[in-house]
Amino acid sequence: MIRFAKSSFALTSLVALSMALPACSSTSSAPAETLPATTDLEVRAIAGLKFDKTSYEVAAGDTEIGYVNDDTIRHTLVVVQDGTKVSGFELKVNKKGAIDSGSVTLAAGTYVLMCTVPGHQNMKADLTVK
């Protein structure tokens, strides 16, 4: 009789647990992050410590830059002109699928996009601002 009671309790507990678990999870996934509709330039970090392009182009003035991480490790994005980072602008994406965006005002000229994570010094691309 005690053996039956233990089995009955275990079975009841198992059934209750199996009913509670679906309530803790969701069958629908959260919407994927997307870049703002106002994005002027989209840059993607890809596997192999690279950006998706070797050069980009935007119009001079206020520029909304969107950064997407298609890689599995963290990356940053800064804009550099003549060896100096453009002040106040840095984007960070810490995991695959992460996005970040920000606005920067750029005068016409040539710039370099870079990742500043140690060991990622080869992540560079030219940026022409017209």
Image (cartoon, rainbow, N blue to C red):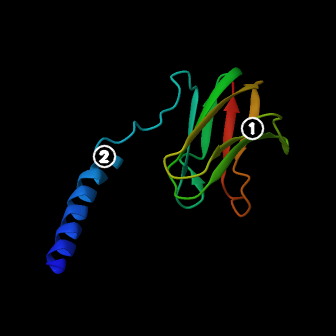
Label 2 environment density (alpha carbons within 10 Å; few <14, some 14–19, many ≥20) = few
What is the total number of numbered labels drawn onto the structure image? 2
Give x and y (percent) for residue 61: 72, 19
Instruction: Tell me if residue 2 comes above or below residue 32 in the rendering.
Output: below
What is the residue that sits farthest to the front in this orientation? 1
Give x and y (percent) for residue 12: 20, 62
SS label for mark 2: helix
Instruction: Tell me if residue 95 comes above or below residue 60 in the rendering.
Output: below
Whether residue 123 sits left or right of residue 53 in the image: it is right
Depth check, front residue: 130 or 2? 2
Give x and y (percent) for residue 100: 60, 38
Which residue is pictured at 69% across the width and 24% down the height? 130
Quarter-of-image position of residue 113: top right
What is the number of the mark on residue 43?
A: none
The residue singled out by tag 1 in the image is 111
Q: CA distance from mark 1 to mark 2?
A: 51 Å
Depth check, front residue: 123 or 109? 123
Quarter-of-image position of residue 117: bottom right
Give x and y (percent) for residue 11: 18, 67
Whether residue 82 sits left or right of residue 5 in the image: it is right
Residue type at tag 1: Tyr
Which residue is pictured at 58% across the width and 58% down the height? 73
Instruction: Check whether the beta carbons of the residues at disc 1 and disc 2 lie within 8 A of each other.
Output: no
Depth check, front residue: 31 or 109? 31
Whether residue 113 sits left or right of residue 93 in the image: it is right
The residue singled out by tag 2 in the image is 23
Residue type at tag 2: Ala
Instruction: Tell me if residue 107 comes above or below residue 101 in the rendering.
Output: above
Quarter-of-image position of residue 92: top right
